[in-house]
Image: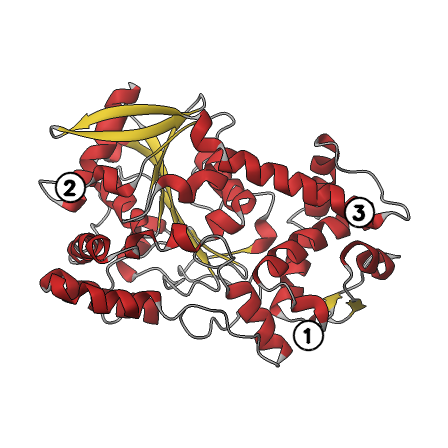
Amino acid sequence: MPETLEAFLSAVHRTFTEVTRKAPDYFAGRPLRAAGPPAGAEEAVRAAFGATLRAADREEFTAVDRLLDLRRTGPDGTDGRREERENREDGEGGEGGDDWAGWRRRMDRRTAVRSARAARLAGVMDRREARAAGSRVRYRAGGQGPLVVLLTALGHTDEVWYPLAERLLPGRRVVMWDAEDAAGPPGPAERRLDAVDAVLAAEGVRSCDVVGWCSGAQLAVEYAHRRPGAVRAGVLLHGSYPRTATDPASAYERNLATVCASVAARPQRAGRALRMLTGAGGTAPLPADEHLAAVEALARVPPGLEAVLRHPFRDADALVRYSRTLDGLWRRPLPEPAPGSPPLLSLAGELDRVAAPEPPAALAPWLAGRHGVLAGATHYSLLERPEVVADVCRAFLDGPTAAPPATRTTGEVRWAEAGGRAGPGHAAVSAGATR
């Protein structure tokens, strides 16, 4: 069936909202391009978003245009129609007619309601407690169904999970906790793995699915190795791992490893290291070149997340604790899978400036080709695109197999080929300098 104007505008709305949240003036002097837009799209985009839409060949696309193109159609050509149906289920759909500005306001309201619901998640989840090696693990739990354990990155709070957890809750029981609530003797990594055992015991279950983000992905791999019978399947989001000299690594990872090793050995250096890691602040103007500007706009961290993302670096004492833990974790090589090890899937960000999108060689045997790269995404897709990440997680955890999961938003993910490297699902984009 032909693409409807509302389905097309739903894809525009997602793209426009994501870009302008990070770069409010991006569309002030730059057009949005689309190949073969439906009739009336130029006028509707101007009325709804105040932006200019141009019909163009894909060879002219910027990274922003390419993202819109990927969102227009899924593997069965129904992504836009799916969003259209969801809009109507939420009472926000219906053809805009001549009132596309009103349609856009309804869409904005729907997005705001969903964001507010995620922000209130902590208040509606149960606060529970488990005992691990003589100490307490305070965690949040909600929902009914198969248990999903969310493993937070070192130094972070469970706040990073709220948008994703809110989308995983229907049909699942989700548990999460602050990373520092699982710290302590006998050792940082072992203590965090003990915490998973303790939570499973407190929940009265013998097995779970695990989802780990950043350094939490390494903990997910280690737990799958330690307790293969306790893990059904796992998803590794933007994993940051110990890497050998031959593994691809981001400049940020290399710098962070050096800084953390230095602070762990000499805590008195924490103050100076803190200034190096947090930087001077401020946002540079977008480049004049339109293609570079599109990449930079997508690669930015959206405003409002700074306090959440800088939690490990909030003060010198926090940095010392974080440095000791991360340095110790990255000195542990990734374990090799054994017979009976659970299936794991990796999802990376094309514009991740924190963790290299390519997994280290030691992780490849765990993945068996199950590695995807999310188009135009940063290290924080669980906060920026929770609907896509939840779609991938649900599809894989519902039926973990050797093949990539069949998701409703597959168009945004470039899946690995048989050799393990992500295939040419969409054109590569240079990530530029690290943040």
| Residue 229 x %, y % | 25, 31
Three-letter amino acid code at the position of disc 2: Glu
User: Which of the two labelled residues, at mark 3 and mark 1, occupies the earlier sequence position?
Assistant: 3
* Residue on which the image places disc 2: 190
Residue 78 appears in the figure = no
Displayed quadrant of residue 200: top left
Q: Tell me if residue 239 can be seen.
A: yes
Separation of marks 3 and 1 at Cα, in angstroms: 25 Å
Identify the residue under disc 3: 6
- Residue 371 quadrant: bottom left
Q: Which is more foreground, mark 1 or mark 2?
A: 2
The residue furthest top is: 204
- Tag 1: Cα neighbours inside 10 Å, few (<14), some, or many (≥20)? few
Give the residue at the far bottom of this rendering: 288
Residue visible at 61% across and 81% down? 288
246 up-or-down from 98: above or below: below
Q: How many marks?
A: 3
